[in-house]
Amino acid sequence: MEGRGRARGAQVQFVTIQRLGWRCLTIALVVETMARQPQGIQSVDAVFRLIEALTTSSRAMTLTELAQAVGMTVSNTHRYLVSLLRSGLIRQETGSSRYRLGPSAIRTGLAALRQTDGFEAASRAMVELRDAINMPVFISIWTTEGPTMVRWLDASHSITVNVKPGSRSPVLNGASGRVFLAFENPERLRPVLEAEMRSAPGRFRTMADVEALQHEVRKQGVSHVLGERTPGIHGVSAPIFDAYESLVFSLTSVGLENEFDASYEGEFAQAVKAAARQASRELGYDEAAAEEFRTSIALGPSARAAAPQVAASRKRTAAEPSTDARALAKPSSDGQALAEPSSRTRRTRSVRTGAGLSPRKSG
């Protein structure tokens, strides 16, 4: 007797014989499982694994290294590389015969950056964060007058906070302001910080006090306030970086002190930090590369020479990028103010060697 079965859109036809009924059931279950998984083109998957290996590597790679990285034989890997060379997605160094990304890959990456809307990515992170923790959330940008809120999202419950889009946060006593204090370009930060210290010094009477706060925020990767700006209101904030390792937004959440645990280890701080990291990734920020670059600069030429080996070892053993605050990049030093949240200008990579206002020797 013939029968028909349907497995999530996949037609399953089999002959039902009483003594083989259990085998028919097994076949149907296998086909149903396969139907649930979208089928791709294996050769395309292999190509992108090769490109990903070159993207995450800090140096050019040999044929053998690439084959090991993607789990293919050397002969199969070589055939894929020939096609990638023809397309310009990779290139081969003349002297060493090693492979690295080519001009077509560079053009593709730049096109992706041009098509990436930073404000859209930050707004998406806001919505997901607000829905996850059910607390008010907002994003801020840096202007010549300091950190300025550009969007606010309410939670399902009301909270009275005297802020709205266009409101400015102090860099010393505001959660979002402290993110910019720790990660903003020192030259752009200087006049705002100096004016704030003159008008309301509070606990930050010396630059040593300011440096201690900057170090704390960088170490934690997130800032918090416990009623310093508005009594009874707690807040946490985290940085959002772009592909050029520049700080473009702060992502902040606030709440009543009896409802909002603003400790660094608390669920709200961790949720805000995770949402900001995801938005940074969408904008092309590479935490591992930023950490490697800053470490090599801080430790000198010997560390730069050893960086490729250290990076390769770390990538083989780590499943996820480090969440250490050292993986957070420092913004650029071109001094250009961000006038609109969606404006994107290429900035040169820079590293702060001091606490923010005046350079000092590291170590």
Image (tube, rainbow, N blue to C red):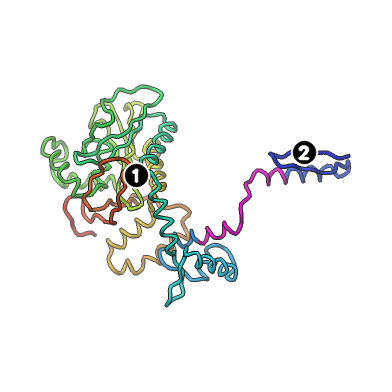
Q: Earlier in the sequence, mark 1 or mark 2?
A: 2
| Residue 109, position as x, y percentages in the image | 42, 55
Give left or right: position of 339 versus 198: right
Which secondary structure dominates the residues rendered in magenta? Answer: helix
Which residue corresponds to mark 2? Answer: 5
| Residue 238, position as x, y percentages in the image | 33, 41
Residue in the picture at 26% in, 52% down: 332
Give left or right: position of 88 versus 326: right
Can you say which quadrant of the picture contains the N terminus?
top right
Residue in the picture at 52% in, 58% down: 48
Mark 2 secondary-structure assignment? strand
- For the residue pair 62 and 209, the one nearer the viewer reads as 62
Residue 34 lies in the magenta stretch: yes
**Vertical placement of 236 versus 283: above or below?**
above
Residue extending farthest left: 198
| Residue 288, position as x, y percentages in the image | 39, 56
Residue extending farthest bottom: 95
Could you tell me the amino acid type at mark 2?
Gly
Residue 256 lies in the magenta stretch: no
- For the residue pair 55 and 336, the one nearer the viewer reads as 336
Picture quadrant of residue 24: top right
Looking at the rendered structure, the number of numbered marks drawn on it comes to: 2
Which residue corresponds to mark 1? Answer: 240
Residue in the picture at 14% in, 44% down: 191
Q: Which span of residues is magenta-colored?
A: 31-50
Query: How many other residues sit within 10 Å of disc 1, few (<14), some (14-19) or many (≥20)?
Result: many
**How far apart in space, not on screen, are marks 1 and 2 (Cα)?**
50 Å
